Amino acid sequence: MLRAGFDFGLWLVLDLVFLGTSVTALIMAAMAREDAYRAADKQKKSFWLIILGITVAVNLFVSVLFLSIAGLIASIVFFVDVRPALKQVSGGGGGRRGGGSSSDGPYGPYNGGR
């Protein structure tokens, strides 16, 4: 009885993680510009929207672990390969908001203690 409840809870958490990851990846893929995909030399935007849309549909309507894991892998590939390349091409890379040089610190330029 206790194990059945644990198994159900574990599957529920896994399903929510898979669904959340795929929905987040789909939204981020949809928000990026089409020309950024070409400039980053990645697959077309429509390719990623189709793949990630299928992933969301599988996670919502089909409860097959193999397909859910395949969708999770597609979402992870988007997050670790495509999204950083899109951010770099779009000018969103580096984490600095106002631009600046590589020697800038959080309170302004670092001048070597002079």
Image (tube, rainbow, N blue to C red):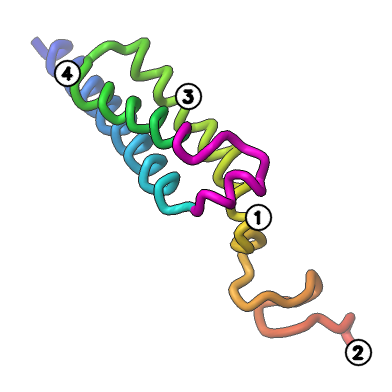
The picture places residue 33, in percent across and down from the top left corner, at 50, 54
Quadrant position of the N terminus in the picture: top left
Of callouts 1 and 3, the N-terminal one: 3
Label ID, residue 88? 1
Magenta segment includes 112: no
Dot 1: element: helix
Q: Earlier in the sequence, mark 4 or mark 1?
A: 4
Closer to the N terminus: mark 4 or mark 2? 4
What's the amino acid at mark 4?
Answer: Phe
Q: Which mark is residue 8?
A: 4
Identity of the residue furthest to the left in this view: 1
Q: What amino acid is at disc 3?
A: Ile
Q: Are marks 4 and 1 in contact (CB under 8 Å)?
A: no
Residue to which mark 3 is pinned: 73
Q: Secondary structure at mark 3?
A: helix
| Quadrant placement of the C terminus | bottom right
Q: CA distance from mark 1 to mark 3?
A: 22 Å
Please give the range of residues in magenta: 33-47
Circle nearer the viewer, 2 or 3: 3
Q: Earlier in the sequence, mark 2 or mark 1?
A: 1
Q: Secondary structure at mark 2?
A: loop
Residue 110 vs residue 72: left or right?
Answer: right
Residue 36 image offset from top left, x and y in percent: 59, 51
The secondary structure that most of the magenta stretch takes on is helix
Picture coordinates of residue 104, whole percent (x, y)? 75, 77
| Mark 4 and mark 2: Cα distance apart in space | 62 Å
Q: Using the image, determine if residue 10 lies above or below residue 44.
A: above
Residue occupied by mark 2: 114
